[in-house]
Amino acid sequence: MQDLVALESLSTQDIESLLDLSQNMAEILDRPIKKVPTLRGKAVVNLFFEPSTRTRNSFELAAKYLSADVINVQQSGSSVEKGETLWDTARNLSEMAVDGVIVRHQVSGVPQQLADILDIPVINAGDGSHEHPTQGLLDALTISQAKGSLAGLKVAIVGDVLHSRVARSDIHVLLALGAHVVLVGPPTVLPESYEELGVEVTTDLRRALSDADAIQVLRLQKERQNSGEIPSLWEYRLRWGITSQTVSWAKPDAVILHPGPQNRGVEIDSDILESSRSWVLRQVRNGVAVRMAVLFRLLGGGRGDE
Ligand code: CP
């Protein structure tokens, strides 16, 4: 691995190896002193052109726990506001002797384009509706911690699948690890072509949740309402909302995930988020562990260094 742009391009062996390493990193997070010297002397740039709470801060903490230096660059306040291209910004930052670039951008494909022009590792922190690879890894890690393994589990992904980079990364990692994946949501944002990947696609929430072991609830992108692709918030909640009633259709020990940020009372009810079934805060904690693993793998050397 030179870069991490998409889980689609990783082998099952690469994914399993990253998840094993993430589990080791999760154990470091449980120590009273979390800082380890692994990336001492390295520097990374967090280049975020879209808002983020979880991903940006967990990449920053992951780098700091590994003793790397971090700088944060956002569109606001950077020379992009004066007309500089993103490519020039990235090239200039990479000349400052940094060892890796983490990038989030609203346009799909930007991380790959940066990977093509930079000779340091590029990590995709979410690009448009393409992929969010570290989110996919942390979701897989969380389900496997809850259930022991992913092989043979039924995982339902609920919501606006069409525009979701999280769904795309989840699909790749979950299929690679042997889960049965069901996609469910409004027909206008549910690409039937995904069946070719080997997943089940349905608009029927009850069918999707029946016997499910895990439910990944996607954020309803409210801005999509203006495009007419999704119904009113009231209708969405009625047909695809995760509530105490709809959760009862899944297995009694099914776990609930949500990548965040959540619209409470729309795609998921507060009582479900606060229930013992909810693993959403574990997802956030695992996000730090997964990002430590990715930074270590790409900046810290090969597998023999573990
Ligand atoms: N899950 C996720 O990407 O959250 P942020 O937008 O807060 O980073």
Image (spheres, grey):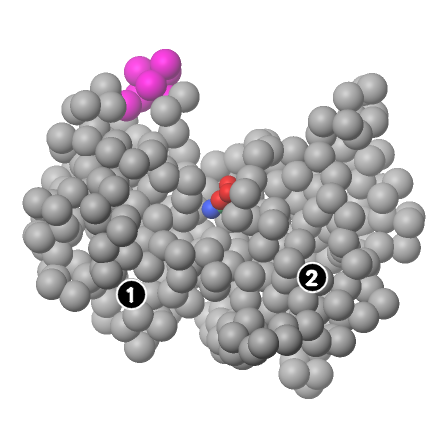
Q: Amino acid at mark 1?
A: Ala
Residue in view at x 67 percent, y 67 percent: 65
Q: Position of residue 214 (x, y in %)?
A: 24, 59
Numbered circle sitting on residue 179: 1
- Dot 2 amino acid type: Ala
User: What residue sits right under mark 2 in the picture?
Assistant: 63
Depth check: 67 or 145 in front? 67
Residue drawn at point x = 23 percent, y = 55 percent: 275
Q: Earlier in the sequence, mark 2 or mark 1?
A: 2
Residue range highlighted in magenta: 224-231
Q: On screen, 7 above or below 151?
A: above
In the image: residue 159, left or right of residue 73:
left
Is 74 drawn above or below residue 150 in the view shown? above
**Percent coordinates x, y for residue 198 in the rendering:** 29, 55
| Residue 43: x %, y % from top left | 81, 58
Secondary structure beneath label 1: loop
Q: How many marks?
A: 2
Residue 225 sits inside the magenta stretch: yes
Q: Residue at x 56, y 78 (%)?
A: 31
Q: Distance between the Cα atoms at labels 2 and 1?
A: 31 Å
Q: Does any portion of residue 157 appear in the rendered image? A: no
- Specify whether residue 228 is painted magenta: yes
Between residue 106 and residue 248, name the one nearer to us: 248
Q: Residue at x 82, y 35 (%)?
A: 89
Quadrant of the drawing holding the N terminus? bottom right
User: Which image quadrant is residue 270 in?
Assistant: top left
